[in-house]
Image (cartoon, helix red, strand yellow):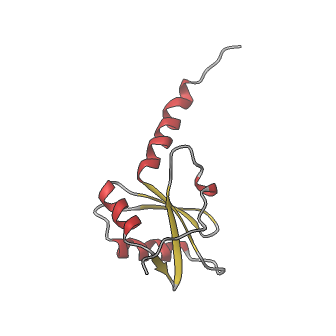
Amino acid sequence: MRKTSSSLSYPRRKALLSTILTLVGTITSEKSVRFTQFRDIMASVWKSEKDVNMTEIGPRRYVFQFHNEEDINRVAGEGPWRFDQNLIVMSRLEEGYIPMFVPLDKAEFWV
């Protein structure tokens, strides 16, 4: 039996590299959220230099992919953010983590 792994190496590497500029987030609401409305409003609020790619990966769980370090640092650092009066909890996606399982149970606040 011949082993073939070369076809998996490039996409896997690309997926790992994409975690560098990625946030995972959730909205602390019991109600469902209209993703298109959430995406459009947050894109206008964040005013990133380049578009932010937003993907809904589960109920009220999202992946935000940025194109440069300045934008991700600004969004991550200027929070906390809200949508429809509900807190958005975000965490930077670290290499090797699966976005659905990133803990999103804490948020930092300045008081």
Residue at point 63% right, 77% down?
32
Which quadrant is home to the C terminus? bottom left
Residue pushed farthest right? 1
Which quadrant is home to the N terminus? top right
Residue pushed farthest top? 1
Residue closer to the observer: 99 or 92 = 92
Question: Residue 34, how many percent across, how many down?
Answer: 56, 76
Identify the image quadrant of residue 65: bottom left
Question: Residue 20, how many percent across, how many down?
Answer: 42, 48
Question: Residue 5, how many percent across, how many down?
Answer: 59, 24
Left or right position of 6 against 75:
right
Residue at point 66% right, 14% down?
2
Residue pushed farthest bottom? 85
In the rendered image of this protein, does residue 108 appear above or below residue 82? above
Left or right position of 26 against 47:
right
Question: Residue 91, how many percent across, how many down?
Answer: 50, 61
Residue pushed farthest front? 111
